Image (tube, rainbow, N blue to C red):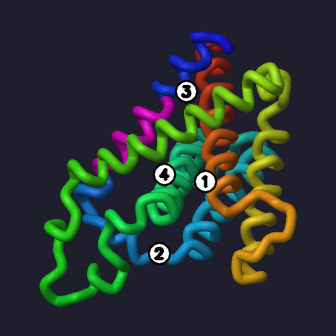
């Protein structure tokens, strides 16, 4: 495993977390109202736009590019994984809608800590998989990374339609973790391509 890959992974996660923290400051913990299928759909919307931009060769009509969408996917995956792994540490969506609700339901510091819990676990997963696969993602083209994300989304949607019941397949959290890591790989590849263009 390349130390450079780990450094770039951490940099991408840091950028995503900064965006998450800033949006939490603007909107509070309103994302807790999302149920898991809604988070899956938000990820789908972002991945679909990436795929469209790839097909249009980045001829976008709004200024956000693929990097912005990959960061959005990372953060939606973090939200889903916080709900799955740390659900007992966050208020319920219903609590957010109560008249007394506000940002005081969960502190920005606590959200930051939970973000770190998730990103640490997904980094550890990435390290294990990269060890076994030899960083094969580096030889993939960006559209293939997008397709991997779309496949994982399709799997999640099927699982959600089946009430989360799987017989031999990976769980929902494994799919969200993989989507997060594929998105970071996409960000790294965009970052590296951008540096080569200079």
Q: Is residue 82 above or below residue 54?
A: below
Q: Are marks 2 and 1 in contact (CB under 8 Å)?
A: no
Q: CA distance from mark 1 to mark 3?
A: 29 Å
Q: Quadrant of the C terminus?
A: top right
Residue 75: image tag? 4
Q: Secondary structure at mark 3?
A: helix
Disc 2 target residue: 34
The span picked out in magenta is: 12-22
Left or right position of 33 against 142: left
Residue 9: image tag? 3
Dot placed on the residue nearer the N-terminal end, 3 or 4: 3
Residue 141 image offset from top left, x and y in percent: 83, 31
The quarter of the picture where residue 91 lies is bottom left
Tell me which residue sits at (73%, 67%) in the image: 156
Disc 1 target residue: 61
Q: Are marks 1 and 3 in contact (CB under 8 Å)?
A: no
User: Is the residue marked by circle 4 packed among few (<14), some (14-19), or many (20+) residues within 10 Å?
Assistant: many
The quarter of the picture where residue 57 lies is top right
Q: Are marks 3 and 4 in contact (CB under 8 Å)?
A: no
Dot placed on the residue nearer the N-terminal end, 3 or 2: 3
Q: Quadrant of the N terminus?
A: top right
Q: CA distance from mark 3 to mark 4?
A: 14 Å
Q: Residue furthest bottom?
A: 99
Q: CA distance from mark 4 to mark 2?
A: 13 Å
Q: CA distance from mark 1 to mark 4?
A: 23 Å
- Please give the count of numbered marks on the rendered protein: 4
Residue 165 image offset from top left, x and y in percent: 76, 76
Dot placed on the residue nearer the N-terminal end, 1 or 3: 3
Q: CA distance from mark 2 to mark 1?
A: 28 Å
């Amino acid at each position: 495993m390349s130390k450079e890959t780990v450094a770039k992974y951490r940099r991408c996660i840091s950028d995503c977390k900064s965006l998450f923290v800033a949006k939490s400051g603007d909107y509070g913990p309103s994302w807790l109202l999302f149920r898991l299928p809604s988070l899956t759909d938000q990820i789908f919307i972002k991945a679909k736009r990436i795929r469209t931009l790839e097909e249009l060769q980045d001829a976008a009509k709004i200024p956000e590019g693929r990097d912005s969408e990959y960061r959005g996917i990372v953060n939606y995956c973090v939200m889903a994984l916080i709900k799955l792994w740390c659900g007992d540490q966050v208020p319920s969506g219903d609590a957010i809608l109560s008249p007394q609700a506000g940002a005081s339901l969960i502190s920005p510091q606590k959200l930051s800590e939970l973000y770190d819990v998730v990103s640490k676990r997904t980094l550890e997963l990435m390290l294990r998989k990269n060890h076994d696969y030899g960083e094969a993602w580096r030889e993939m083209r960006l559209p293939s990374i997008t397709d991997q994300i779309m496949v994982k989304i399709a799997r999640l949607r099927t699982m959600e339609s089946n009430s989360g019941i799987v017989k031999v397949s990976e769980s929902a959290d494994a799919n969200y973790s993989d989507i997060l890591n594929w998105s970071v790989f996409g960000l790294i590849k965009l970052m590296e391509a951008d540096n080569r263009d200079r």
